[in-house]
Image (tube, grey):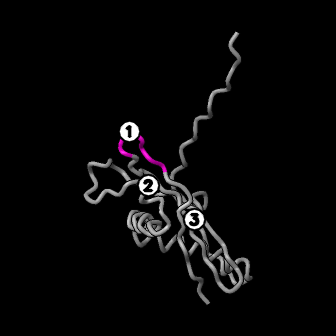
Amino acid sequence: MAASFSWRVTSLKTDPSDDNYIFEALVNIYGTEGSVTKMTSASCVFPGKKADVTDFKSLDDLKKAENEATIVEWVKAGFTEYKVTKLEKMVQNLIDQHNGTYNKEKEVTANETSYPSLPEITPDPDPTPSE
């Protein structure tokens, strides 16, 4: 059985100096199969500004329930079909794990290859109290 998915907007980041242009949306992707529902979250950034949009919608309009689908459409378009499929597969895997039907994929990590070493991350300096 395959899950049915629903995408829900959980928050929006806007630019108050640009007529509240939405520059980022956080969504939750829910998958339900039978009595099991699982979820993952993702963030989508919308580059640009209000002047770059041909059909600008005000934040007040977009906050209405009937316009959540518009934001979800923008997010999915920004992600492209590949990432939409990948996110929904992640949720399906969570459901399959819950149901005991998960066939774990084989993951090959960089340390199992002859790839060059990964760069070492510089640690943050220890803060010292000013005297």
- Circle 1: residue type: Ser
Mark 1 or mark 3: whose residue is earlier in sequence: 1
Residues under labels 3 and 2: Cα distance?
21 Å
Magenta span covers which residues? Answer: 13-19
State the residue at coordinates (47%, 66%): 68
State the residue at coordinates (61%, 76%): 31
Q: Would you name the residue on which mark 1 appears?
A: 17
Of residue 15 and residue 100, the one placed in the foreground of this image is 15
The percent position of residue 55, horizontal first and vertical second, equals 28, 60
Q: Would you name the residue on which mark 3 appears?
A: 28
The C terminus is located in which quarter? Answer: top right
State the residue at coordinates (41%, 67%): 70
Q: Nearer the viewer, mark 3 or mark 2?
A: 2
In the image, residue 107 lies in the stretch drawn in magenta: no
Residue at disc 2, secondary structure: helix
- Circle 2: residue type: Asp
**Depicted 116 relative to depicted 32: above or below:** above
**Depicted 6 relative to depicted 12: above or below:** below
Of residue 74 and residue 88, the one placed in the foreground of this image is 74
Residues under labels 1 and 3: Cα distance?
27 Å
Residue 83 shows in this picture? no
Of residue 40 and residue 10, the one placed in the foreground of this image is 10
Residue 31 shows in this picture? yes
Q: Nearer the viewer, mark 1 or mark 3?
A: 1
Q: Quadrant of residue 61?
A: bottom left
Residue at disc 3, secondary structure: strand
The percent position of residue 39, horizontal first and vertical second, equals 63, 69
Q: Would you name the residue on which mark 2 appears?
A: 60
